[in-house]
Image (cartoon, rainbow, N blue to C red):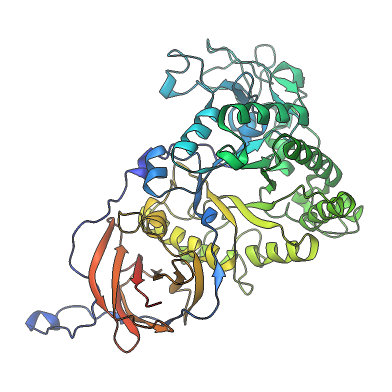
Amino acid sequence: MRLLVTLAAAATAATLGVPGLPLASTAAPAHGPADALAPRVATGPKLAVDAARGKHRISPLIYGVNFADRGFANQVDLPVDRWGGNSTDTYNWQVRASNHGQDWYFTNFADCWSDAFGFCRRGRDHSAADALVAQDRSTHTATLLTLPLLGWVARAVSYAGDHPCSYPAADDPQDDHDPYHPTCGNGRRGGQWLTADPTTAGLQVGPAFSAQWITALRQKFGDARHGGVSIYELGNEPNLWDSTHHDFHPQPTTYDELWSKSRDLAIAVKDADAGAATLGPAEWGWPNYFCSAADHVDQGCFATSPDRAAHGGTELSAWYLQQFAAYERQTGRRLLDYFDLHYYPQGQYSPATDVTRSLWDPAYTDPSWIHARIDLLPRMRDWVKAGYPGTKLGVSEYNLGLGVTTDERLQNVIEADALGIFGREGLDLATFWPDGGSPVPAAAFRIFRNYDGKHHRFGDHGVRAQSRDQRRVSVYAARDGAHGALTVVVVNKVSSPLRTAVRLKHTPGAHKAKGYQYAGAGLRPLGGLRIRRHAVHLTLPALSVTLIRVPMVP
């Protein structure tokens, strides 16, 4: 996971509906003396959309974020908002605090320890979790809330600045200390972990603790079927616990521990709110998709790795799904609704827009230390199909611009491409994780959720869309309902303008189209577009995202 940052800045980025000259037209161009000096626009790859083929449902939950700003949530009709990350796996809802683990010196912080509350000087009666759920109810957003699977939560907090922490440094100097509260250390001396007493800052809890929390949430906000929390995440990145939460979990997570804890917590969720969905294992990334932390993955992950070998050499993700499937066969009760993984770029990509290829391209070798064909979404589908059919797919943490580019325009292009891929590949849920260097790419979300400022959206019934060269230009298409307008998103990933045409099939009565475009300065309407000979001709600015809306005759 990445440290939480505010989305307020992202919510105020580009504005909609700014009048501008059309950038695309099928009219013959006017010629004059200046045209001889104008640079020629290269021809882009051929694009084709067939409204009668490749029909598939697009889940609205793929357009989610973590810790959404209210303004942004309202602007894009945010479908799902996640309360997640490392600190949520140690959250104590009763004292309204969490231990921040390795992210910040294994220290307990109260929810009010923020600038908004004057670092608890302007009131202590604040639950950040309750505030997120309350906001989600007001914006008609589903809440995805992480429950503490780790087994330890923050024991207590201080409002005076002397925060409890797992590695007190007064008599035990360490390699690094909290620059604001030097009495807390990083838990290492000479690069080696110190032994912590987990009860110094922590309280040991079990599934009953989460069941009580769900009951309290139901009493305050209603149950999952009536506007309350609708999805519960079973912990966060469990195979990193021996580093992110070394004070509470110094030993590597094993196959059996992950299963037994996930099973017991899922039972508690279903007992406390039968209408709520569960999501797991929220694993951080490669190679812990395949092996447990007890397999010492820093040395590689193989069928012969010790913990994996003890479980028949089965990949961890596949085995996890198999256990839930076996439980349902034995009891008739489904405990897992979403199979969920996290995904972040691990290398440098050239061009940067290639970063999305590891989501779907089976021929693409990721240019990172992974150096393998990740093929993430098809791989997840295969695991589910083989191990636990009917389980939905989630990616509850991702940020494909993080560490790849700091250019806001390019980040929006990458995100628009990712959102299109999520819909095409049948992902059921995704929540973007914002970071200081890569905040929410608001324009990309608006293209899909509110392209005209009137809350019109990209369609929810996907249809076939093809590009002759998806590496340069990608295209995604969907209808608004089974018989509504056709929406097409075209992503120009190259750093030069291109001319192209979108060929349309099975679009009866379609003669005109509307267009909206992002090219680094907000979304703007393109003006009237005409459909001639079943095609819309476009000029695509460099690094741009264009949406076309084509009315259809029923």
Q: Quadrant of the N terminus?
A: top right
| Relative vertical location of residue 440 with respect to residue 69 in this rendering, above or below | below
Horizontal arrangement in the rendering, residue 525 relative to residue 154 (left or right): left
Image location (x, y in percent) of residue 66: 52, 42
Give whichever of 545, 407 is nearer the camera: 545
Specify whether residue 46 is in view: no
Q: Residue at x 44, y 66 (%)?
A: 480
Q: Residue at x 32, y 43 (%)?
A: 12
Q: Residue at x 21, y 78 (%)?
A: 39
Q: Residue furthest bottom?
A: 533
Image location (x, y in percent) of residue 72: 39, 44
The quarter holding residue 386 reads bottom right
Specify whether residue 226 is in view: yes
Give whichever of 551, 23 is nearer the camera: 551
Image location (x, y in percent) of residue 48: 44, 82
Image location (x, y in percent) of residue 18: 21, 56
